[in-house]
Amino acid sequence: MNIALFGYGKMGKMIEQIALKRNHTIVAKVDVDTTEINYSEIDVAIDFSMPNAAYGNIKNCLEHNIPVISGTTGWLQDYQNAVDLCKEKNGAFIYASNFSLGVNLFFELNSYLAKMMAPLKQYNVSMEEIHHTQKLDAPSGTAITLAEGVINETDYTNWKLDEAGEQEIPITAKRIADTPGTHTVSYDSEVDGIEIKHTAHNREGFALGAVIAAEWIVGKSGVFTMKDVLNLS
Ligand SMILES: NC(=O)C1=CN([C@@H]2O[C@H](COP(=O)(O)OP(=O)(O)OC[C@H]3O[C@@H](n4cnc5c(N)ncnc54)[C@H](O)[C@@H]3O)[C@@H](O)[C@H]2O)C=CC1
Ligand SMILES: O=C(O)C1=N[C@H](C(=O)O)C[C@H](O)C1
């Protein structure tokens, strides 16, 4: 497969390594200073760029009928526009806040636990995410997906960074050097606590998941999620 990388930073470079090992060809490495892109040779685009760049990259690819995988976080105010454009162009698009298999299993576990905890009003939920110090957005996309998973199963209505109101899930974002991504969901009562935690040891899991999603989407049309790719419930 001919892959174009949009964003050639930490993730772009890791995805390149994994893609080459899986016998794909990288036909473009598009970064902030790229002036020309030959769309005709691209089978699929993988965007891990920046919050202010992701939607523009996705739009350009969909307008050139290129299927797009996006892992960039912090641009979701434009997600619905991407969905609408994808449908209008009969294109193919996946956004995932986290492409790793482990986190996608963790999302399922989070929803299952939230469903069990929903009637137990003596427990309050909270979340913590820890990432490296170069991360631009907070809270992480993964923490937002986890919060949405809890909101779908409980009476919580929203999430909030730091101090939260009555029906809101408080999310704490910490920035510590060289931390690829750690997410904890906690339920606390006066007498005990329950925690589930996912720790990324490096970026390989994210990159492999993105390449698997790219392999999966070629030849399809529609807006998909990692649940579709991994065939999860
Ligand atoms: N969904 C997932 O599984 C994961 C998502 N991420 C997200 O992916 C994004 C990238 O992460 P990193 O590679 O760690 O960041 P990074 O800062 O190392 O790389 C981002 C790259 O995008 C480039 N860029 C800026 N404007 C651009 C434009 N208009 N077009 C193309 N490239 C442009 C930057 O110059 C930089 O090289 C972040 O939003 C991060 O939160 C990161 C890891 C996993
Ligand atoms: O910026 C990162 O590094 C990561 N970003 C994603 C997020 O915001 O959840 C995924 C992963 O946690 C690493």
Image: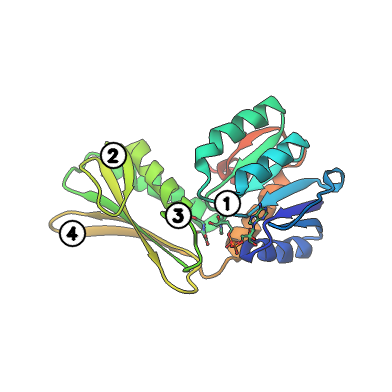
Q: Measured from the top left, where is residue 180 in percent x and y?
A: 51, 67
Disc nearest the viewer among 4 and 1: 1
Tag in front: 3 or 2:
3
Please, what secondary structure does the residue beneath circle 1 have? loop
Q: Label 2 is placed on what type of residue?
A: Tyr
Residue that badge 1 annotates = 72
Disc 3 marks which residue?
140
For the view shown, which residue lies furthest in the bottom direction?
A: 177
Mark 3, secondary structure of its residue: loop
- Left or right of 221: which side holds 49? left
Where does label 4 land, which residue? 192
Does dot 4 land on a helix, a strand or a loop?
loop
The reply to whether the residue tagged 3 has its Cβ within 8 angstroms of ligand 2 is: yes
Q: Nearer the viewer, mark 2 or mark 1?
A: 1
83 to the left or right of 154: right
In this view, the mark in front (3 or 4): 3
Residue contact between numbered discs 3 and 2, judged by CB atoms under 8 Å: no
**Is the CB of mark 1 within 8 Å of ligand 1?**
yes
Q: How far is mark 1 from mark 3, CA to CA?
A: 10 Å
Q: Does the residue tagged 4 have its C-beta within 8 Å of any atom of ligand 2?
A: no
Left or right: where 146 falls relative to 79: left
Classify 10 Å Cα crowding around label 4: few (below 14), some (14-19), many (20 and above).
Answer: few
User: From the viewer's perspective, is 117 left or right of 84?
Assistant: left
State the CA–CA distance, disc 3 to disc 2: 19 Å
The front one of 36 and 41 is 36
12 vs 230: above or below: below
The amino acid on which the numbered mark 4 sits, given as a three-letter code, is Asp
Residue indicated by mark 2: 156
- Which residue corresponds to the image point at 72% horizontal and 28% vertical from the top-left? 89
Of pointers 2 and 1, the one earlier in the residue sequence: 1
Q: Report how far apart the C-alphas of labels 4 and 1 lie in the structure.
A: 36 Å
